Image: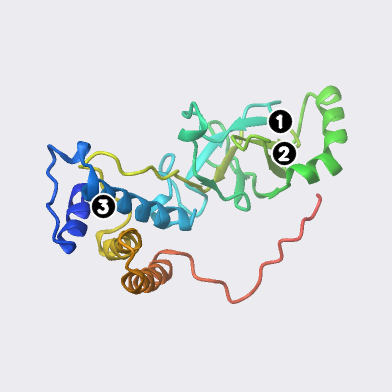
Amino acid sequence: MATTYLQLTNELLRELNEVVLTSANFGSAIGIQGHAKDCINRAYNDIVMDEPQWAFLATGESGSTDPFYGNVYVETVANQRWYELKASSSSLTNDYGYIDWDNFLLTTVGVSGESSPYTVKNLGYVTTEAWKDYFRVSENKDDAEDANGGTPARVTRSPDGRKFGLSPIPDKVYRVWFYAFDLPTELSAHSDTTVFPNIYNSVLMARARYYLHQFKENPQSSAFALEDYKRGLRLMKLNLMEPTPGTIKDDRMRFV
């Protein structure tokens, strides 16, 4: 069972021999109890924001498919270049927290009415500056003169980061798969729980102790807590993140 915000806060308060909170007075906590809540939240945010691609932040899959495709897909429309990354989002605060722009896949597999031979290809990511320098003029001309479009080969992001654009403009329906990671939110209600497995709560507690001992002007205890946190965070990354490759990937841009 997941550990709640209330349980984590009370664990920290017990270590200080302070009065613990209840679900009834949690929301109105002040003094050292209120500061303990803040320390837990600050520690939690430090962990979830440390790595945008934590496994526990990966968003749910769109439909049933092999996760090697991606965990989200968007279907294109003929002669439309730009698409929202998260159609259900109404603001930046509800958008995905991170998009892996180097791993966009274009395919006709799963598209209604399509059959073998399928189109399947990786899309090359083009930065906004490269788009302006190498593609903006030709693409603008294609927009005006070629209503038929083509098979996209490249993907770029909109200036506000909320949409992706395809080049050439799609000539029909394709599925564009990519990996998206949710934007973590702060703990708020007493019943809120962390997004990572309970086994790593000790890492959160070490970080919270660090902040609390700093507040109490206890540099020795805060230093010990900081070392505990660093060791725990390294272990989390070792267990939950993709291993570092033994070879270096050639990411130099190729214009096709």
- Amino acid under disc 3: Ala
Residue position for label 2: 151
**Where residue 56 sits in the image (x, y, percent)?**
38, 53
Residue at 37 percent across and 52 percent down: it is 42
33 sits to left or right of 169:
left
**Whether residue 2 can be seen here:** no
The answer to whether mark 1 and mark 2 are in CB contact below 8 A is yes
**Where residue 123 sits in the image (x, y, percent)?**
67, 48
21 sits to left or right of 81:
left
Q: Choose the circle earlier in sequence order: 1 or 3.
A: 3
**Whether residue 125 can be seen here:** yes
Q: Choose the circle earlier in sequence order: 2 or 3.
A: 3
- Amino acid under disc 2: Thr
Q: Secondary structure at mark 3?
A: helix
Residue at 73 percent across and 46 percent down: it is 127
Count the marks: how many? 3
Q: Which mark is residue 171?
A: 1
Residue position for label 3: 36
**Where residue 105 sits in the image (x, y, percent)?**
60, 47
